[in-house]
Amino acid sequence: MRPCDPPVHAVARPAALVDTQVRGPRGAGLDTVPEEVPVALAYNGIAHAVMLASPTDLEDFGLGFSLSEAILEHASELYDLEIEDAPHGLVLQMRIAEARFMQLKARRRALAGRTGCGLCGVDSLDQVARPLTTLTAGPAFPATALERALGQLETRQPLHASTGGVHAAAWADRAGNIQAVREDVGRHNALDKLIGALAGQRQDFRAGFILVTSRASFEMVQKAVTAGAGLLAAVSAPTGFAIRLARDSGLCLAGFVRPGRYTLYAHPERVTD
C-alpha cells in the first residue's frame, strides 16, 4: 500500500466460489458455482447503492464505482474505505471529500442493483445519461493488439475457469499485453473493479484499452468514457444506445472481438489494420 492510498480495514469475506451438490444424467456430485453477495456502498455514513457482486477486490470496486458514477473526480478524494459485515451482506463504508459528498447529496438517487442491471433504481429519465466530457483524439491501436489481448485473457480468469459464470474486464497496453484483470458476476462490477484498480495505481487510461467479456451496453460505454479510456472492446455485441454514446463521446467501440475478427462501431480510425 502506497502512502497516498486510503486506509482499508478488511473483515473476513465470503468465499467467491461455492461447492454445491448437483445431480444430472451422469449421477450426483459436486459443482463449483460463483458466489453472489449484496454489497452496500455508503458515503460518509449515508447509504447510496446496493449491488450484487462477487466478494473479491472490493476495495477496487468501491473506488471504481465512485469514479465511474462521477461521485468522485479523482482517486485522492477517497480518504478511507472500511469493509463491514452486515446481516445480509457487506457494507463498503467510504469517507470522501466533503465537497464531493455535498454534490452527491444534491443529486442523490436510490440505486438497487441486480446482476446485469445497469439502471435499477433510476426514477427519472433525466438520470439515465449524465453529461460526459468528449474524449480527445488519442493513440491508435494496432488490430493485432485486440487478438493478443483476447488470447491472454483466456488464461487470466480463474473464477470463470472454475465456474463458467463470471465476467471479466481487462486493461491492455497498446501492443495488447494485458496489465490488469478483474472478475465479477456482474459485467458492470467487473469494469468498476478494473477502473478502481487502475486509478489506485495512477495509471493513464489513454495508454491502453479495455477488453470486456460481455456485450457493450450503454453503461459500460459510459463508465469507460468517464474513466478516460479511448477504446472499449467487447467480445459480444453493443447496443444501439451504446454506439450512439460512443460516437458522441469520442470513444472507439469494438464488438464481436474474436480470433481473427472484430467489428468497429464508433471511431474506427483508432484501430489500424
Image: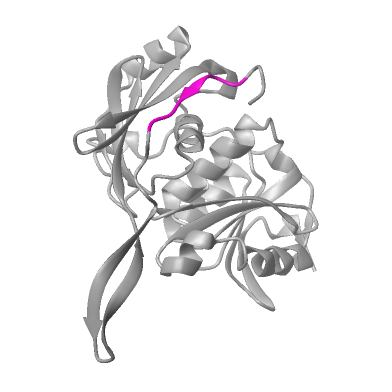
Vertical placement of 119 versus 133: above or below? below
Magenta residues span 5-11
Along the viewing direction, whichever of 39 and 174 lies nearer the viewer: 39
Residue 46: percent from the left, percent from the top? 28, 18
- Quarter of the image for residue 253 reads bottom right
Vertical placement of 92 versus 141: above or below? above
Vertical placement of 31 versus 84: above or below? below
Q: Is residue 9 magenta?
A: yes
Q: Residue at x 20, y 38 (%)?
A: 88
Along the viewing direction, whichever of 173 and 20 lies nearer the viewer: 20
- In the image as oriented, which residue stretches furthest toward the top? 98
Magenta: main secondary structure equals loop
Side (left or right) of 137 relative to 239 = right
Residue 78: percent from the left, percent from the top? 51, 19
Side (left or right) of 177 relative to 16 = right
- Quarter of the image for residue 43 reads top left
Q: Residue at x 37, y 40 (%)?
A: 13
Residue 29: percent from the left, percent from the top? 28, 78
Q: Residue at x 36, y 47 (%)?
A: 53
